[in-house]
Amino acid sequence: MPDIIQLLPDAIANQIAAGEVVQRPASAVKELIENAIDADATHIKLIIKDAGKALLQVIDNGKGMSETDARMSLERHATSKIRKAEDLFTLHTMGFRGEALASIAAVSQLEIKTRQAKEELGTLLVVEASEVKKQEPAACDKGTSISVKNLFYNIPARRNFLKSNSVEVKHIVDEFQRLALAYPNIAFTYVNTDDVEIDVTAGKLSQRIIALFGKSFQQQLAPCEEETDYVKITGYVGRPESAKKTRGEQFLFVNNRFIRSNYLHHAVMMAFEGLLPENSFPFYVLFLTLDPKHIDVNVHPTKTEIKFDDERAVYGVVQASVRQALGAHSLRPSLDFQ
Ligand code: ADP
Ligand code: MG
């Protein structure tokens, strides 16, 4: 029998990997904005058309890429962020897998415009389903603009699987809000089909929360602060009176990365015990900072799950810090449920 195993061509391998990294327009938005953050941008603009199905574009004023790097950025496992295995334990960037651009490029029509500050001219790259169609010098602003057109155009099954525009836009706005919360020192703009829907200037976290969620939060935020050898906690919890019947305004970040954790959500809820009306959820934006060696963010490509080496310690500190925040602000249960 002849040997029959072959390596897959890159374009196919990337397309398969894309299934993991890019589930929907919102996942591409997350990856592109994270790249802009890693590039030290101070202003990040997101533009979408047709819920990101026709276009999603992220424009940043960060450090840009050289022509060679722009080309290289499309290769799978190509990254400027880690060099060796040990770097995984001292991560200080959002990205590190070197998969996002390769994956997005495999399932869309991609256009990159990028220029480093020191260069006169930048680079334009046009890519379709991993194939570079155009690469040429181009006049452009300092920083990087990446346009993703017709996401999944070459995978009809996947494209048909996308939800209605309102659902896809909701996912995009969720990602956008999480990143805008995590980086209040960066200005963000969000434009949906020519309308500026969110435009937030750089400032403090409390200002960012109010800019994103409304003035009603002005009197409702109790600061949370706690530090142990293991973990530091900062952020805000909403007063019990501002709790809502629906979930969706609970934000937990670990080393500035949005994560989901039922376990730590439970810690917050326990701290609110007796203060909330039944079936309601308090607002919170909590940042946990700990030595990267204590966490593993490499659990899943979308990185919203995380493993701590001592989860119970984190639980305890989260609960204590929220209790402290509520107590320190002499919050009493409001009259209707006393
Ligand atoms: P990762 O972020 O995991 O490194 P990506 O595929 O998202 O992988 O990006 C590959 C590389 O392209 C990055 O490591 C970075 O060097 C470069 N890059 C991507 N986006 C930008 C950007 N907006 N500005 C500057 N460099 C970028
Ligand atoms: Mg990235």
Image (cartoon, grey):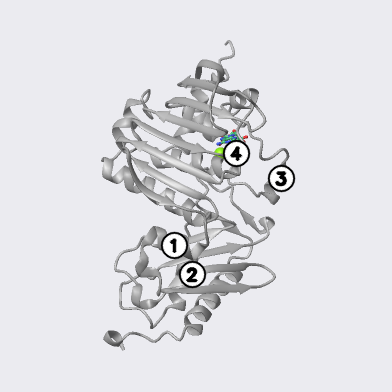
Judged from the image, the quadrant occupied by ligand 1 is top right
Q: Which quarter of the figure is the N terminus placed in?
A: top right
The three-letter amino acid code for the residue at tag 1 is Ile
Give how far across and how far down residue 136 sits, in percent: 56, 16
Give how far across and how far down residue 63 sits, in percent: 62, 37
The outermost residue toward the front is 120
Q: Image quadrant of residue 39?
A: top right
Does residue 308 lie above or below 2 as drawn?
below
Q: Earlier in the sequence, mark 2 or mark 1?
A: 1
Disc 4: residue Cβ within 8 A of ligand 1's nearest atom? yes
Between tags 2 and 1, which lies in front? 1
The residue indicated by pointer 2 is: 236
Between tags 3 and 2, which lies in front? 2
Inter-mark Cα distance, 3 to 2: 31 Å
The residue indicated by pointer 4 is: 97
Residue nearest the observer in this picture, 212 or 312: 212
Does residue 232 lie above or below 25 as drawn?
below
- For residue 87, the mark is 3
| Residue 304 visible somewhere in the drawing | yes
Does residue 184 lie above or below 17 as drawn?
below
Between tags 1 and 3, which lies in front? 1
Inter-mark Cα distance, 3 to 4: 12 Å
Please give left or right for residue 263 compared with residue 50 in the image: right
Q: Residue at x 39, y 71 (%)?
A: 282
In what element is the residue under mark 1? helix
Inter-mark Cα distance, 4 to 2: 31 Å
